[in-house]
Amino acid sequence: MSSCNLLNEMKESAESGHVAYANFARAYSKTNPNIVYCFFEGDEDKKYYGTRITIKYEREFQDFTCEGRDLVLKAKELIKNRKEYNKAKALFFIDKDYTDDTVENELYVTPCYSIENFYSTEETLKKILQNEFNMNESDENFIKIVKLHTKSLDSYHNKLLFLNAWLSCQHDIRISTKLSTRLNINEVLKKYFKIDENMFDINLNLKLNIFDDLENQEILENTLFTNAPKVTTDMIDSKIAYFNKIDKSCIFRGKFELKFFIDFLKRLKEEATSKHQKILTKKYKCALSFKLEDSISVLAQYSNTPTCLFQFLDKHLKVA
């Protein structure tokens, strides 16, 4: 590509709002075919995928943050439609969200709602208990905590079932009607999922009343998301019935799941390191700080890695 054409392409992509693609056009090198160009939705994603790429595969890679799912897909389209990039090893990573999208060629789609769902699991909890709290799996306190986590998570899922069903219906409506309206979920619901307020009390009891509004359709549509399309009762009932048949930890919105998990760990650390335990029978040390803001990078080593991700990376990065 001539320098003039490259400049024009970068200018066009920047004007269209696709900064990541403009950065790729600037960085692309035909003289170094071993470079892997990875496109992510946001900065958090590269923290999760980056550790897996660098630890297992000895490949140099450059990451590009696209600021959204649709822009990752747009970058994929732009690159694949330009013959001058035919030899570029470009990989694209998106969250499944409430869609039915699956892995295809150079596009990786999480099997769960998002990467956050890989963190908030029983398997991750057990790893943290063993490695950060130095608990033995046969320890009565280890068993007690896992059971408490499972029970609390079930209650949490039941409380947020209606909200997740409603949000999923909104996605279906947007796809079927081709509406471009997007719900600013993080902003609208931030008062229910406050970073500085724990959803567990000091006795590790879940404060479910915090989320009462989110079970009320009238509040969702007339107070919180006033510009959202109305959802019929049949749509909600159908979605709830579907969600009740599958693993809610996987399909529910990842940021809700991660908030629950970090709050649980925060209270657990307070209990485990206290001089006067109320739940546990002995004291435990834990140097790790559990903060929602940096949990994706700090807990990356403990989060799940689905088989489909290893298969995807092996296919595209493994050197025979």
Image (cartoon, grey):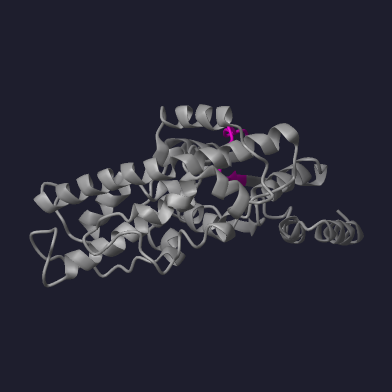
Q: Does residue 178 sit above or below 259 in this rendering?
A: above
Q: Which residues are magenta?
A: 92-105
Q: Can you tell which quarter of the image residue 207 is in?
A: bottom left
Does the magenta segment cover residue 102?
yes
Q: Does residue 2 sit above or below 254 in this rendering?
A: below
Residue 179 visible, this orientation: yes
Extreme residue in the bottom direction: 275
Residue 319 visible, this orientation: no
Percent position of residue 312, x then y: 52, 38
Does the magenta segment cover residue 249?
no
Q: Can you tell which quarter of the image residue 55 is in?
A: bottom left
- Of residues 176 and 163, the one nearer the viewer is 163
Percent position of residue 20, x then y: 71, 58
Which residue is depicted at the point 69% across and 38% down? Answer: 174
Q: Does residue 39 sit above or below 288 in this rendering?
A: above
Q: Is residue 178 left or right of residue 303?
A: right
Which residue is depicted at the point 56% across and 42% down? Answer: 167
Which residue is depicted at the point 42% across and 30% down? Answer: 246
